Amino acid sequence: MKGLYLYCIRERTEGAPAISTRGIDGKGEVFNLVFRKVEAVVSKVSLEEFDSEEIQKKAQEDLNWIKEKALIHESVIEEAMGKNDKILSVIPMRFGAIFKEKASLGETLNKDYSKIKEVLDRIRDKQEWSVKIYLKDKKTFEQAIKENNEIIKEKEKEIGSLPEGMAFFMEEELKEVISKEADKELNDILEGLFERLAMQAVASIKNKVLEKELTGRREPMVLNSSYLVPEENIENFKEEAEGLNHEIQAKGFCLEYSGPWPAFNFTCY
């Protein structure tokens, strides 16, 4: 028995890009179902293979299957959004949104139509951009903190005035002070970077910092953020990101930005 897998909802626009990517099952064609002034991007799937229980089972037993299907899901959404100068407002769906028949999808679109239009209006002519910051050189960062932090300087001066035997025991306390001040300085730096980039956006959000196993990098990620940027601010946003990257490299950081992405972080649907 066949059902409909829903990838995203986008504005109904002349010249909207067709989808060449195959569907979530790797075989079906992706097509649009028009509803008033929006269209649902869908493909037909086997309900036996893609019902909620089966997906939950796969999530526990076959992570490669989930990863493969999630990549297809995102690829379809990105293609539906378009590229370059033709970026459409798109509401991406979470992985696994399935309807048994066209009528049930139509009922949902009709019930939520006002909310859908509100979200599309809110993100129109805006793009989601991602910024990730990594701490490439922790020693350089901590050394910069030691050289400029007055609390650490005072503690070092205090230790230097003590007899040698007592100074030895104070070294551990100094390490704790350095660690505490480094954490404080790191938070202040990241908050400043986040706010400076947010000035080019209408909305911004801090996402979960990803572990090395997910980033594939040796350096730890220290900030993972997303910004909803008006199209007229895109170049300014990129220039600001590049300038910040150059600015923070001397402190042991690396900044990477990417986009545009489907507005997953700014569409609550």
Image: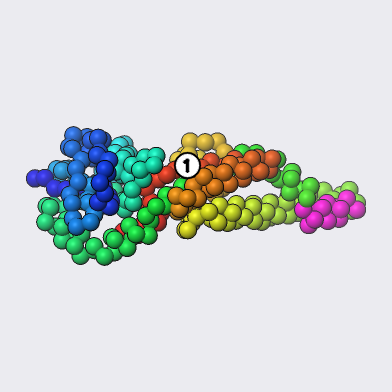
Left or right placement of residue 14 versus residue 183 in this view: left
Confirm whether residue 186 shows in the render.
yes
Left or right placement of residue 10 versus residue 138 in this view: left
Confirm whether residue 132 shows in the render.
no
Q: Quadrant of the N terminus?
A: top left
Find disc 1 in the rendering and name its residue.
258
Residue sitting at the far left = 1
**Vertical comparison of 93 with 44: above or below:** below
**Residue 247 appears in which quarter of the rendering?**
top right
Residue placed most toward the observer, 181 or 134: 134
Determine the residue positioned at 74% across, 43% down: 143
Determine the residue positioned at 86% across, 53% down: 157
Measured as percent of width and height from the top left, residue 254 is found at 59, 40
Determine the residue positioned at 69% across, 40% down: 250
Determine the residue positioned at 26% across, 35% down: 21
Magenta: main secondary structure equals: helix
Q: Give, as a single range, the part of the protein colored magenta.
A: 149-161
Mark 1 neighbour density, 10 Å: few (under 14) some (14–19) many (20 or more): few
Measured as percent of width and height from the top left, residue 205 is found at 48, 56
Residue placed most toward the observer, 164 or 138: 138
Residue sitting at the far front = 14
Measured as percent of width and height from the top left, residue 72 is found at 29, 39
**Vertical comparison of 61 with 163: above or below:** above
Type of the residue with mark 1: Ser
Q: What SS does tag 1 mark?
A: strand
